[in-house]
Image: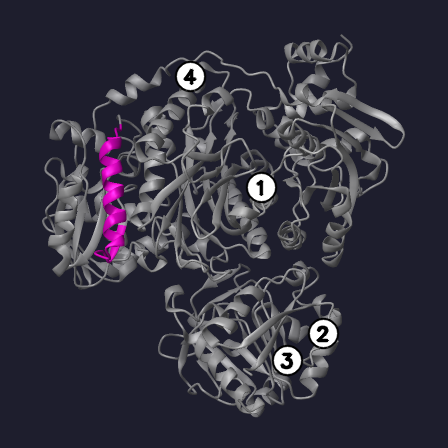
């Protein structure tokens, strides 16, 4: 049995279908949508919190979705060490839920940005980035209006010390310059993990970079890395 | 006559039309009845001045599943059991009054038109026109419109894959916001918008009904307006989140097989939605407005029936299916209300609880009078068409002019706009906005590709309405063909001034005639469309601006071409300018060009098009892509050959060195905009095969030069670092906007 992914669907989520396609197609895993009213995640090896505008981003992105019935189950799943990956709005939901440190504010440009983006891999570690090389720049697109990552100095220092910074925005040479920062994120941060390392949030969309026809497969490398770790776990 | 002129003015009906209503009913209508007539007999809903003209368009074709006027949007069979559903619509006046919400609700409305067919919306495009960006108000309108499209489109998860933005003084008081949506549906799963079975019930789903947008159709969309403040309450506010949920719930309902029909609520709200369904089904309706969920207490039946509150859909279901449909919407937490039923008697009966509110024949309501006002050739045409072209500047100016054109807001990269729209969600986008004249989407189920483009050139239509109409169709289809797709069908939005003015009416008629001829020549039907008249301010009409959205099919999405040059390739020009002598050709090429406008400050000349040559070029482009002989292809239009070459070079990051230009004036050769041409690149080894294919199709083919290096060189005229041209091209729009 290949690893099983549960892909959350809140009202207003729109990357769910793209994740299901990426996982069932190029990755070759089993995946199914999980409606926000469900409360049982026991059948999954990994939970995906996809992008979109859950509840219209009303109040703040992710601020209402965190109260969905399914999020209690996600917290329990993560608490038991289960891998959870949130992208775009999913990252925002995980921050609002307290499963990840920090917050995502309005882009510094005050505009939505949908564009190709380079990300530098900061840490190659299971379960998410084991199969990637530290320091290598990946090309994974972004599409968001609120991706400006912030954490207070103390939290940030702790995260750096714990190796919780997963990805930084960078240029083609892998340098995390201000020009390469699309949204004003502190330290060019594009993705972070929790302290235990089993919850990852990132603003870019790896599920959009899984086919050459659509412009690249660096997202697939990240997903295959995750899938490899899951296969080891479930003993495939 | 009890009715006051003030009342008639409010609903934009004439005294004669009122008398016609009285004659049809055999009595005076009450207030609600009159309001319903006003809405359905508005220009926006009733097409009073355009219906006879629109019949000139070819509407059929073997693959057409739903034709213009029959349903909410056109549908074309694309094989593999799938249909593409698409339509374009204007939201000009709401956007002039409140740009953000006007544009946002324009997107919402066109998405619901496609949704009503049971199709999943998969792409948005838009065509925008503003006054010059050096004016603060025009910048405010531009920013607001782009922000509104961005906010709404991004939230609903439908990629905005392309379109065009242009600036000209005539749009200063009256911007154009035309939004196109395309969707995919199973051929067998298309839903109709006909209430043809008496006993079926109407379910109203989505947003509660409020006091917003009343008289949007009759007031805002169907006449000129001067005092924007008074109109503000007629613009609605969109809720894209609810729209997204509505999309999912409606598609689930359509897939369940429980629906008899589905219709969106757009202009004139419940009135037009219900009455058009009944008219299509040849039935009557009984409605109870007291069952319509309201946003506030105390709303009159008139307000409920004419509200244009957004994010509402009307479902027609058999009574024993109602519970199943209700459960789908409740799962998505979308309110559902049963508000009435289909009857057999052909009457529109509206009650408010026990009280009768309106009772009129459906047939009378939807039978708006039709007008064929007089047309007269505009006096300006002769003078402008015969005006001599300004003398050519010194050839030493060529490089400077090219840079200026690349930076001109009408030509410069629209990256600053495209990156504010999510253009990749749903992971279908193969050719992304700005990479070519058309966007290409991959169809996951079949591996085929859909190319889409929207185009129109008001300046050309102003100088020659017939040619401008034909050119709009030709350019949209040419862009699709350049991407490698065979054009399937088009949708159109006719943006004109007040059709009661003979000169405007001439423009409208000639434009439609040119479009219809082009459609026939290219073998594409018009499957849907929209008419926006009364685009005037202070009595001045906009340039006649027909906007055409074209959709084409690639058998294999991997054959899709962008405009970006491959490196180390040969660059060729396919097609050539029509015209007897070279001086005639030069004059026609320069007519209405961006070059004349930017460099000489002139809009003049008489453009021309050879539709047969156009059809041959398009067939050639599709065949070459299918044979995988090309590395890039790009339509040659705004800014002419030099700009097309430079854009391909900039996008491909490959320089160009060449010459081999057509004879005649150098400025006409470089910057003339004669249609029916394309710039392509191919491997050197394939040049002979491309040339032979062109010969067989009877299309002129000229080798222009080679790609590669970091300079852009047209021998004897231009020699510029590619990086400088790229800086002009990518920085032009932001510079013009003062950003």
Q: Is residue A168 visible?
A: yes
Nearest the viewer among B95 and B440 is B440
| Mark 1 → mark 4, Cα distance in angstroms | 32 Å
What chain letter is assigned to the residue under label 4? B
Q: Nearer the viewer, mark 1 or mark 3?
A: 3
Pinpoint residue B553: horizontal percent, then vertical percent: 37, 49
Please give the label number shown on residue B113.
1
Magenta stretch: includes residue B445: no
- Mark 1 or 4: in front is 1
Mark 4 = which residue?
B503
Q: Is residue B704 above or below residue B209?
A: below
Q: Chain letter of disc 2?
A: A
Residue B381 x, y percent position in the rendering: 32, 19
Q: Nearer the viewer, residue B351 or B37?
A: B351
State how far apart marks 2 and 4 are (Cα): 63 Å
Residue at the disc numbered 2: A71
Residue for badge 3: A44
Measured in 3D between alpha carbons, the distance from the residue under mark 1 to the one under mark 3, in whole angstroms, is 38 Å
Residue B611 in magenta stretch: yes
* Tag in front: 1 or 2: 1
Where disc 3 sits, the SS reads: loop
The magenta region covers B607-633
């Amino acid at each position: 049995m290949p690893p099983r992914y549960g892909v959350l669907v809140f009202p207003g989520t729109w990357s769910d279908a793209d994740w299901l396609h990426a996982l069932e197609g190029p990755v070759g895993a089993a995946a199914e949508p999980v409606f926000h009213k469900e409360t049982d995640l026991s059948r999954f090896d990994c939970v995906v919190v996809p992008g979109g505008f859950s509840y219209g981003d009303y109040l703040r992105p992710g601020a209402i979705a965190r109260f969905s019935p399914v999020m209690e189950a996600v917290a329990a799943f993560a608490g038991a060490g289960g891998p959870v990956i949130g992208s775009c709005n999913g990252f925002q939901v995980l921050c609002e839920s307290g499963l990840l440190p920090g917050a995502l504010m309005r882009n510094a440009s005050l505009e939505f940005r949908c564009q190709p983006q380079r990300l530098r891999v900061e840490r190659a570690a299971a379960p998410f980035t084991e199969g990637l090389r530290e320091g290598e720049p990946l090309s994974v697109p972004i599409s968001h209006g609120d991706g400006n990552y912030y954490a207070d100095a103390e939290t940030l220092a702790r995260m750096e010390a714990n190796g919780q910074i997963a990805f930084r925005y960078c240029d083609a040479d892998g340098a995390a310059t201000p020009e390469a920062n699309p949204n004003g994120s502190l330290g060019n941060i594009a993705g972070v993990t929790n302290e235990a390392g089993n919850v990852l949030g990132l603003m870019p969309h790896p599920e959009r970079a899984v086919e050459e026809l659509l412009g690249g497969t660096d997202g697939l490398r990240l997903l295959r890395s995750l899938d490899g770790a899951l296969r080891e776990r479930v003993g495939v | 006559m009890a009715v006051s002129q003030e009342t008639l003015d409010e609903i934009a009906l004439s005294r004669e039309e009122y008398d016609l209503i009285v004659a049809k009913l055999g009595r005076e209508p009450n207030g609600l009845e009159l309001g319903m007539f006003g809405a359905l007999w508005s220009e926006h809903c009733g097409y009073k001045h355009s219906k006879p003209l629109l019949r000139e368009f070819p509407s059929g074709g073997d693959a057409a599943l739903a034709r213009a006027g029959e349903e909410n949007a056109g549908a074309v069979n694309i094989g593999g059991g799938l249909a593409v559903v698409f339509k374009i619509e204007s939201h000009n006046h709401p956007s002039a009054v409140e740009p953000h919400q006007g544009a946002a609700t324009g997107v919402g409305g066109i998405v619901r038109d496609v949704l009503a067919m049971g199709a999943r919306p998969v792409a948005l495009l838009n065509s925008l026109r503003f006054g010059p960006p050096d004016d603060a108000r025009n910048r405010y309108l531009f920013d607001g419109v782009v922000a509104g499209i961005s906010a709404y489109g991004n939230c609903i998860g439908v990629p905005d894959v392309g379109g065009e933005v242009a600036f000209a003084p005539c749009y200063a008081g009256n911007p154009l916001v035309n939004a196109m949506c395309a969707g995919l549906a199973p051929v067998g799963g298309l839903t109709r918008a006909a209430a043809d079975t008496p006993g079926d019930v109407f379910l109203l789903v989505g947003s509660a009904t409020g006091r917003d947008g009343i008289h949007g159709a009759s007031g805002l969309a169907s006449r000129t307006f001067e005092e924007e403040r008074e109109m503000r309450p007629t613009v609605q506010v969109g809720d894209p989140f609810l729209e997204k949920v509505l999309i999912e719930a409606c598609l689930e309902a359509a897939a369940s097989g429980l629906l008899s029909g589905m219709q969106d609520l757009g202009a004139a709200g419940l009135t037009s939605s219900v009455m058009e369904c009944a008219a299509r089904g040849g039935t009557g309706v009984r409605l109870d407005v007291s069952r319509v969920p309201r946003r506030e207490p105390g709303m009159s039946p008139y307000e409920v029936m004419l509200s244009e509150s957004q994010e509402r859909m009307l479902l027609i279901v058999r009574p024993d299916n109602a519970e199943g449909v209700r459960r789908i919407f409740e799962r998505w937490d979308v309110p559902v209300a049963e508000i009435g039923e289909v009857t057999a008697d052909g009457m529109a009966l509206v009650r408010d609880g026990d009280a009768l509110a309106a009772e009129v024949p459906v047939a009378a309501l939807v039978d708006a009078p039709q007008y064929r006002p007089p047309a007269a050739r505009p006096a300006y045409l002769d003078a402008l068409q015969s005006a001599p072209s300004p003398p050519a500047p010194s050839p030493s100016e060529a490089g400077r002019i090219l840079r200026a054109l690349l930076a001109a807001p009408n030509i410069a990269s629209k990256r600053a706009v495209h990156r504010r729209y999510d253009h990749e969600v749903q992971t279908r986008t193969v050719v992304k906005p700005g990479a070519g004249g058309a966007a290409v989407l991959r169809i996951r189920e079949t591996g085929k590709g859909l190319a889409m483009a929207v185009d129109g050139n008001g300046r050309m239509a102003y100088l020659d309405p017939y040619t401008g109409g034909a050119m709009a169709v030709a350019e949209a289809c040419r862009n699709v063909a350049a991407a490698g797709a065979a054009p399937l069908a088009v949708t159109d939005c006719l943006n004109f001034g007040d059709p009661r003015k003979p000169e405007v009416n001439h423009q409208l008629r000639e434009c439609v005639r040119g479009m219809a001829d082009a459609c026939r020549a290219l073998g594409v039907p018009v499957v849907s469309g929209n008419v926006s008249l009364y685009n005037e301010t202070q009595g001045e009409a906009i340039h006649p601006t027909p906007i055409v959205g074209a959709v084409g099919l690639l058998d294999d999405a991997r054959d899709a071409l962008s405009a970006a040059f491959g490196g180390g390739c040969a660059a060729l020009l396919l097609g050539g300018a029509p015209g007897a002598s070279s001086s005639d050709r030069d004059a026609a090429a320069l007519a209405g060009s961006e070059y004349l406008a930017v460099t000489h400050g002139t809009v003049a000349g008489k453009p021309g098009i050879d539709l047969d040559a156009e059809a041959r070029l398009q067939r050639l482009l599709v065949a070459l892509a299918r044979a995988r002989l090309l590395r890039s292809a790009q339509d040659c239009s705004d800014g002419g050959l030099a700009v097309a070459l430079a854009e391909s070079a900039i996008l491909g990051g490959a320089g160009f060195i060449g010459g081999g230009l057509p004879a005649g004036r150098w400025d006409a050769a470089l910057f003339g905009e004669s249609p029916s041409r394309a710039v392509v690149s191919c491997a050197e080894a394939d040049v002979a095969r491309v040339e032979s294919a062109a010969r067989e199709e009877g299309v002129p083919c000229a080798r222009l030069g080679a790609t590669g290096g970091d300079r852009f060189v047209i021998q004897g005229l231009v020699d510029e670092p590619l990086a400088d041209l790229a800086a002009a091209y990518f920085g032009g729009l932001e510079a013009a906007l003062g950003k």
